[in-house]
Image: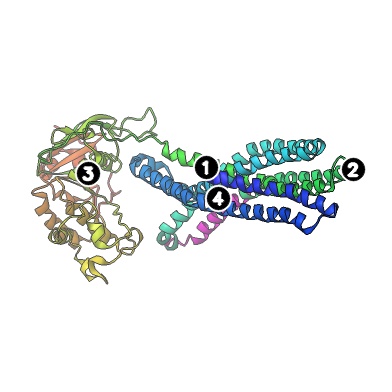
Amino acid sequence: MILGTVTALAAHMFALTIPQFLSALVNRLNDNGTFEALLPAVLAVLGFGLLEAVMVLLRRWLVLTPGTHVEAGMRRTLYAKLQDLPVAFHDKWPSGQLLSRVTGDLSLIRRWLSFGLVLLVANGLTIIIGIGVLFTFHWILGLLFLLTSIPIWIRGYRFEKQYHAVARVSQDQAGDLATSIEESVHGIRVVKAFGRSGYFADKFAMDASNLRSTEMKKARLIANIWIYLALIPEFAVGLSLLIGVWLVSTGELTVGGLVALFATTTVLRWPTESVGFLLSMTLDAKTAVERFFEVLDAPVEITDPAKAKTIKKPQGRLVFKDVHFRYADAPEDQPDLLNGVNLVLEPGESVALIGITGCGKSTLTALSTRLYEVTGGSVELDGVDIRDLNRTELRKHIAMAFEDATLFSANVRDNVLLGRPNATKKELSQAIEIAQAQFVYDLPEGLDTRIGEEGLSLSGGQRQRLALARAVASKPEVLVLDDPLSALDVDTEAMVEDALRTVLKSTTALIVAHRPSTVQLADKVALLEDGKITAIGKHSELLATNDHYRHVISSLDADGNELKSKPRKKVTKK
């Protein structure tokens, strides 16, 4: 990048040297010089012109490749940061804003590094040196150009303050527009099903119109500074012509000097005129850098320990000790969502977690793999606090299957083996069989069939079965199932449950239950109420002894939906 700047400056210096030889050439012509006398000056002009062209070519060759390397490095760094940031960060940031930073902002930074920065430095130095050259012709002419440049720099300073604020708004609006596109495309089935295409089209048009208005503000600011950049140099050239002719008439300046003067101002025209768009490009890049570091500087609150522990003989004993959790944006007067949870899962034991909607069941399961961090208490795996384990190590021992099954744009095999790529063919087929996902063999290319974006080419039940197969294939010591069977029909659910029982005999399992049939999978049931585990036991025991458990069970239908028919009645124990 430095060499590119040097070569760009060298190109301008060669261009500024040409007028010196033009001055000698014209003066010799004026003195009736011979061809032999003119030839050296002509060859010098040609030579310096070729050198200028070579420097321009060299500048492009030097800066383009490293500029792309810088962009790629920043993109890799930003993506790695996004992967490292906790789920709580992604809950707050719209995907379009992150997408615009990874793509648009970094491309802008690369163009500025390869073009804007190099030329801004080279052109700025050329203007300063060029004004100095004008002083060599005559001090009046040099002073004239120096004085006329002052309004340009004053206007440029004001332009910087105004344009920077507008540029930031523009790039944020571009991120919002990307979010709007992502949401409407991702939810196209819902949009069409409810006949709201017109509404989303109008919303998108409004967002696009707001961005257009901001871009027009930028255009007006750029146009305003271009008035100064175009008119003031032209005014200076015209005034220099009058003064130059007068100086020639008085004998203080030669005709060749006057020609060289205007040749020099021609060389300076491009650097002067480029100040406007280079300055606006620099301010856009400044905003892009700020947006880049907003993500890069975001704190990673869930980190690996400095001295990580390992589990030598993993058994799968999972313990929640006085676990507290509250979301960062929760009101201060609101109690913790999880307010002292105590729960022990012995190796090979399966526990169904049940409670009313919103009581924190899914949050509790997410704490086991540190998708969120406990705000109090601890979670232990085989006697080791999970905060003392590397996250990669922890997630080898604990696998999760979510209710909202997310698949990737890859083939079936890669999706199922995401957590354990080195699994054997037999283990792969077993996982598919347990999840009752044999439909994959009927797909056009079988296991090599590429699944569309987020698996939307499959039904909800098919996606859930593949997600369950993915969790089973990883062969964890602890299997966390967050209602992974909600989209299955009754018959398929029964077959999956029968197959899962063979897995659960040797695997510790924490199962979030949203329907009564899921409870039957577990050895015992844990009731989550008011942020605590208030009862643990077998399903039949809790039905007989616990009023709140009966209320929760009776409020769920076969599909796991809360019924509204009967309010809970308070029962007085005798």
**Amino acid type for the residue under numbered disc 4:** Arg
Give me the C-alpha separation between circle 2 and circle 4. 41 Å
Residue 246 - label: 2
Percent position of residue 566, x then y: 27, 46
Q: Count residues near mark 4 (Cα–Cα under 10 Å), then give few for <14, some for 14-19, many for 20+.
A: many
Of mark 1 and mark 2, the one earlier in the sequence is 1
Q: Nearer the viewer, mark 4 or mark 3?
A: 4
Task: State the image quarter where residue 414 is shown.
Answer: bottom left
Give me the C-alpha separation between circle 2 and circle 3. 84 Å
Give me the C-alpha separation between circle 1 and circle 2. 43 Å
- Identify the residue position indicated by label 1 in the image: 2
**Amino acid type for the residue under numbered disc 2:** Trp
**Amino acid type for the residue under numbered disc 1:** Ile
- Identify the residue position indicated by label 3 in the image: 395
Secondary structure category for the residue under label 4? helix
* Quadrant of the image containing the C terminus: top left
**Amino acid type for the residue under numbered disc 3:** Arg
Magenta residue check for 199: yes
> Relative to 309, is 198 on the left or the right?
right
Foreground residue among 410 and 487? 410
- Identify the residue position indicated by label 4 in the image: 59
What residue span does the magenta drawing correspond to?
193-213
